[in-house]
Image: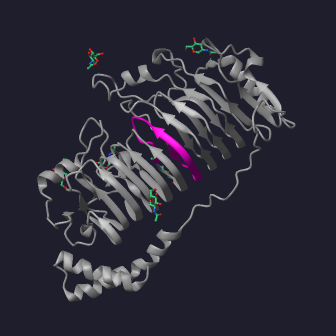
Amino acid sequence: MDNFSLVSFLGLLIVACGVTGSLEYYNAGKVVYENVGILEELESFEIDDAYEVETVDVPSWGSQHSGKVLVNVDSFGAIGDGVSDDTKAFVSAWQTACSTPRAVFLVPPQRRYLVNATRFNGPCADNLVIQIDGTIVAPDEPKNWDPDMPRLWLDFSKLNGVLFQGSGVIDGSGSKWWASSCKKNKTNPCRGAPTALTIDSSSAIKVKGLTIQNSQQMHFVISRSASVRVSNVQVSAPGDSPNTDGIHITASTNVVLQDCKIGTGDDCISIVNDTSGIKMKRIYCGPGHGISIGSLGKDNSTGIVTKVILDTAFLSETTNGIRIKTWQGGSGYVRGVRFENVRMDNVANPIIIDQFYCDSPKSCQNQTSAVQISEIMYRNISGSTKSAKAMKFACSDTVPCSNIVLSNINLEREDGTAETYCNSAQGFGYGFVHPSADCLSSHDKSCTFSDQNEHVASPKTRNEDIVHTEL
Ligand SMILES: *[C@@H]1O[C@H](CO)[C@@H](O)[C@H](O)[C@H]1NC(C)=O
Ligand SMILES: *[C@@H]1O[C@H](CO)[C@@H](O)[C@H](O)[C@H]1NC(C)=O
Ligand SMILES: *[C@@H]1O[C@H](CO)[C@@H](O)[C@H](O)[C@H]1NC(C)=O
Ligand SMILES: *[C@@H]1O[C@H](CO)[C@@H](O)[C@H](O)[C@H]1NC(C)=O
Ligand SMILES: *[C@@H]1O[C@H](CO)[C@@H](O)[C@H](O)[C@H]1NC(C)=O
Ligand SMILES: *[C@@H]1O[C@H](CO)[C@@H](O)[C@H](O)[C@H]1NC(C)=O
């Protein structure tokens, strides 16, 4: 976009807001001009997904495995009847596979292997392939879970150059865990539950084609890792299963998720602290709480997330679309994010920044510090919104959001009442933006813009916005 169209945009803006004098025209012009560099950066920055993670691809475990050493869990005594405890067999097979160059750790098809919480630690010999074609199932009774691994089920750590693949299923048997969650029944104590699959402290990892389902809590966590490629992974759990995030990324860099279909009871994807260089491509999400950066800043913590791209996604019937959520009292920043080519179907908050996030049974205290949010672009986002607030930028009163950029947005509500809410949010739009987002350039701290330019923000509606408790 050239400076000329920026100026035309500004002209329209002045008419719409009707409060900006000519002096401010120049001031505002300067502000917009300074934005051009940021705009160019936001429009064009890339995550280097061309980088090939070095793993050796095995077409199929049964084919003549060129120099591969097959390590079949059945050869280590696994029964695979879904009832016998196969943990020991998996651990022995892992020890062999991990110490053997070019090994294929094989979970064969058409069987169910019952496996307890287990650590699969590296480092391993070169070119390990983990081929999961059968089903790995977790014991379903929370009372008997290993107290030394309260938050883990299948935990892979310290791996380098490993390929996970197959048409198999990782099934957390989560229903009893869900029933005992404090989100299901307030008399239950709030405590964490295991993550089905964790890849921790690893690098150059590929994950292709697996299905992860019915996890006790989060399905797939990527933590403290670099250069991870996830493709054609499916995640599924009921829409009412508590805290069952699909793919959760923390303290990691250079992660690409593509062609994933995710439906859960929490975020389809969540990206949290100390993470940079994340690309998501061709993602299907629903049911679920949407695709989120955050939550960040809980208990006054620091949260830093930079360089995130979501390109091509379809969200259906989710409670949020593309979301950034932070708790009051945090510090750090979210900077350099581009959400583009997203289609929404009956999504409750299609575009949302929520800096008053409070996922707690108690309401949260107002605080002055906050995670700073800036340089967030939304481009080519369309579809239907379930709630009136198709776009909601609820930013911290003391740490405003800056440089929110909207381009080619078309979000419609059945009854035609879609609107944009802003609190302490600054930015601009160009191209077609519906509902109008003039409130991003308004000098009022808090206002809502429908296409009729009505200010409908009142203390009452504002309170409802702020106390957003996801229970
Ligand atoms: C799996 O967990 C159950 C329940 O805690 C326990 O009885 C069993 O011994 C464990 N299996 C192994 C191989 O550790
Ligand atoms: C919640 O849990 C309590 C104690 O276990 C139980 O008595 C009650 O029936 C449960 N309520 C619901 C709605 O399941
Ligand atoms: C977030 O990451 C930073 C390192 O970048 C670390 O210092 C901080 O403790 C982390 N915060 C949380 C809540 O883990
Ligand atoms: C966070 O900081 C505020 C303000 O300093 C303080 O009142 C509050 O107790 C802190 N919360 C936690 C969990 O440390
Ligand atoms: C806009 O996004 C939709 C949905 O992902 C996509 O089908 C369409 O091709 C995109 N349009 C452009 C101009 O990129
Ligand atoms: C927090 O701030 C909002 C307005 O910014 C106000 O309506 C609300 O009453 C405050 N809550 C508390 C607990 O002070």
Colour option used: one colour
- Quadrant of the image containing the N terminus: bottom left
Q: Position of residue 456 (x, y in %)?
A: 13, 60
x and y percentages locating residue 336 in the rendered image: 47, 64
Q: Give residue 148's quadrant in the image.
A: top right
Residue reaching furthest top?
84
Q: Is residue 215 above or below residue 22?
A: above
Total residue callouts: 0
For the point 12% across and 51% down, the residue is 460
Q: Is residue 29 left or right of residue 44?
A: left
Q: Which residue occupies the foreground of this view, 29 or 153?
A: 29
- Position of 20 with respect to 161 (left or right) is left
Q: Is residue 252 magenta?
A: yes
The image shows residue 335, relative to residue 462, as above or below, that is: below
- Quarter the C terminus occupies: top left
Q: Position of residue 380 (x, y in %)?
A: 41, 62
Relative to 183, 142 lies left or right: right
Considering the whole magenta stretch, tell me its main secondary structure: strand
Please say if 171 is above or below 440: above
126 drawn magenta: no
Residue 308 showing in the rendered view: yes
The answer to whether residue 321 of the structure is visible from this angle is: no
Identify the residue shown where x is 27% and y is 35%: 361
Identify the image quadrant of residue 15: bottom left
Q: Residue furthest right?
A: 67
Residue 295 lies, in percent from the top left, at 39, 47
Q: Which residues are magenta?
A: 248-271
Q: Quadrant of residue 431?
A: bottom left
Residue in view at x 51 percent, y 52 percent: 274
Residue 153 in the figure: left or right of residue 359: right
